[in-house]
Image (cartoon, helix red, strand yellow):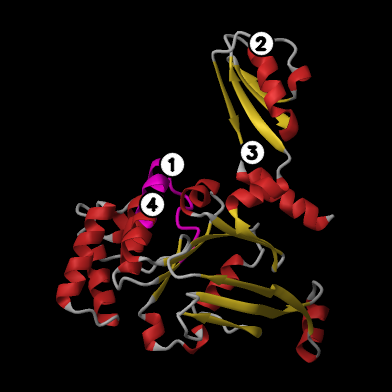
Amino acid sequence: MSHAIHAHELTKVYKVTEREAGMAAALRSLVRRRTEEVRAVDGISFDLAPGEVVGFLGPNGAGKTTTLKMLSGLLHPTSGEATVLGFTPYRRQRDFLRQITLVMGQRNQLVWDIPAIDSFELNRAVYRLAPADYRRTLDELTELLDLGPLLRKPVRNLSLGERMKCEIAAALLHRPQVVFLDEPTIGLDVTMQRRIRAFFADYNRRFGATILLTSHYMNDVEALCRRVIVIHEGTLLFDGDLAALLARFSSHKTIVVQLETCPEKLEGYGEVVACEDGLVTLRVPKAETSRTTARLLADLPVIDLTVEDPPIEEVIERVFAQESE
């Protein structure tokens, strides 16, 4: 199998009913409804190799979640085709469902009023896991996610981070080979985000799972993905290496300089982004980076200096801006 995930001209169109406000408009709509087509996903194509971890990026409403739902079989595409592990997702075949999972940071699958371990037992029965295999996988997940103290508490008594760890464990008990992650770290604190990212990196290494990740936290993408796919208004804008995205759409570098105090005049070195307590952030053209760095070191009492690529959020915004233009 050359591709774990294959999408070709994948399209999803919704028909949305519209009407004016008021009782008269409501009565007219009973006889003649006015509808508008909304193209949530508009002919996107891409392939993921087995074991690949890919970031799936775009603003709210870009079509990311709709695409994941089509690939996981929750939605039937309007046109185009998709295969996952050689299966057609919307047919929802048992062998397909046993090999994939969808983790949505804003959706719960655990039963609210019972301990998480009972929901795990339910999943064991649904997936018909052998008791020995279930116990072995649960022990591994418990160790990786530090679930020991949480398993016997009612889900309603868990914090958001604790609940998310249990949700992830429930989704992976059957050891899926394809994992769709839709905002898995949303709402979590920085420490918990880091632990979740580390867990999925380890899961990918251990089991060779293919992972398609959507996230608004660019740290998730930087930590897990070498390749990114960017979509906007349902269409594909970019598909390639993360480094290539930065090189293609970023014409500037960020220079961070630590000084004793903030000098009065820094504009001659570049665009001053911030200056506080002696920590100066400058935005300079790539071609000027070396010359500007040398000038800073020669002219100012520099304590420390680093040169960085711009934040990915800034690069993504530039992608969207160029598309709009």
Residue 70 at x, y percent in the picture: 55, 78
Which residue is more in the foreground, 102 or 244? 244
Circles 2 and 1: CB distance less than 8 Å? no
Mark 2 or mark 1: whose residue is earlier in sequence: 1
**In the image: residue 57, left or right of residue 5:** right
**Mark 3, residues whose alpha carbon is within 10 Å: few (<14), some, or many (≥20)?**
some
Spatial CA distance of label 2 from label 4 is 43 Å
Q: How many labels, in total?
A: 4
Residue under label 4, please give it: 196
Residue under label 1, please give it: 190
Amino acid at circle 4: Ile
Residue under label 2, please give it: 298
Query: Is label 1 in a helix, a strand or a loop?
Result: helix
Mark 1 or mark 4: whose residue is earlier in sequence: 1
Mark 4 or mark 3: whose residue is earlier in sequence: 4
Circles 1 and 3: CB distance less than 8 Å? no
Spatial CA distance of label 1 from label 4 is 10 Å
